[in-house]
Image: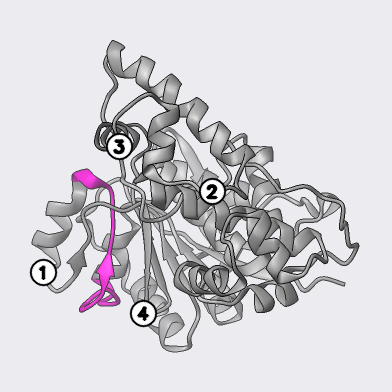
Amino acid sequence: MAVTTRIALLAFPGIRAFDVSVITEVWGVDRTDRGVPPFDLRRTAAHPAPIPLRGGLTLTPDRTLAWLPRADLVVVPGLDDHVTPAPAPVLDALRHAHAAGTPIAALCGGAFTLAQAGLLDGRQAVTHWNLTRLLRTHHPHVTVVQDALFLHDDNIWTSAGTAAGIDLCLHLVRTTHGAEAAATIARSMVTAPFRTGTQAQFIEHPTPHTDRDADTLASVRAHALAHLAEPHTVATLAGRAAMSPRSFARHFQATTGTTPLRWLITQRIAAAQKLLERTDLPLPEVARRTGFGSEITMRQHFATHLSTSPRDYRLAFHDSVPRPGVDTPRTDP
């Protein structure tokens, strides 16, 4: 029987209703009938009284902060007012959780709460691009990263605004329970299953001309996904788009927020994860089907991007029912 993961949603006056909804949708819905592990999401607060949220909503805590030491993960929603001090018991609870080794994740302006607790001093953090200057001004000891969707530093996760909070929550599911569990949740939420944390927070607004370029680039991405086993370079991908490599790379990053090769590596890792979870294919064959060429290269990319090896990933997330006939998985272009 799968072990239940305990998630603490840290609640206090001023948190954003949207972030509460994201956390609840990811960890508060029972999807065990679709293979997702069980979660126990608790709304923890200093007091049991209902907490008012913007828009006429209220959040009723079901646990006090005394429950936090039982949590496997603490998630902090963003804020409506980013400079309002969080309650002292909340900040103390965050410090104790971090000292105990519990992972902590903050969505959007939740980084301000972690900064108030002193947890981001001397560490890297990200927040909504429009709040980076405010975070630097009020918390000068924090290294604020300008252009990322989410990042990790010393068991603490922070994310950029709104949709990036969804990306971080799904990433945390993926790293703990595997790509298939995260993809199942993403499908039920009708959202993209995988955006790397190093992707830019926003992309250029396309003009009518670049709209046509975007259509062309989408077909190039679709071709690359359908032929991951083949070697691809910026030059070969640019050739399919009838562009010069330099122009292709510029338009690609403007459209997707990342470089062609970084996007390709991300897709190959995602495809390899699914094959490792779903099949018993030998590691060299997984590497060949996903375009890494060799097990050594695949292992290097897993170490860099997932902090694990393909072999250890399979041991952690392999499906108990092997499906050796599964083809190379595809993700959205």
Closer to us: 266 or 54? 266
Residue on which disc 4 sits: 92
Total number of numbered discs in the rendering: 4
Q: Residues within 10 Å of mark 3 (few under 14, many from 20)?
A: some
- Disc number placed over residue 194 in the picture, else none: 2
Element under disc 1: loop
| Amino acid type of the residue that numbered disc 4 sits on in the rendered structure | Asp
Question: Magenta segment, which residues?
Answer: 116-130
Mark in the foreground, 1 or 3: 3
Task: Give the Cα separation between the discs numbered 4 and 3.
Answer: 53 Å
Residue on which disc 1 sits: 140
Res 83 → quadrant: bottom left
Does the CB distance between marks 2 and 1 fall below 8 Å?
no
Q: Earlier in the sequence, mark 3 or mark 2?
A: 2
Mark in the foreground, 1 or 4: 1
Residue on which disc 3 sits: 245
Q: Earlier in the sequence, mark 1 or mark 4?
A: 4
Asked whether, in this view, residue 54 is left or right of residue 321, the answer is left
Element under disc 3: helix
| Amino acid type of the residue that numbered disc 1 sits on in the rendered structure | Pro
Closer to us: 171 or 141? 171
Element under disc 4: helix
Q: Residues within 10 Å of mark 4 (few under 14, many from 20)?
A: few
Q: Earlier in the sequence, mark 1 or mark 3?
A: 1
The image shows residue 109 at horizontal and vertical percentages of 30, 53
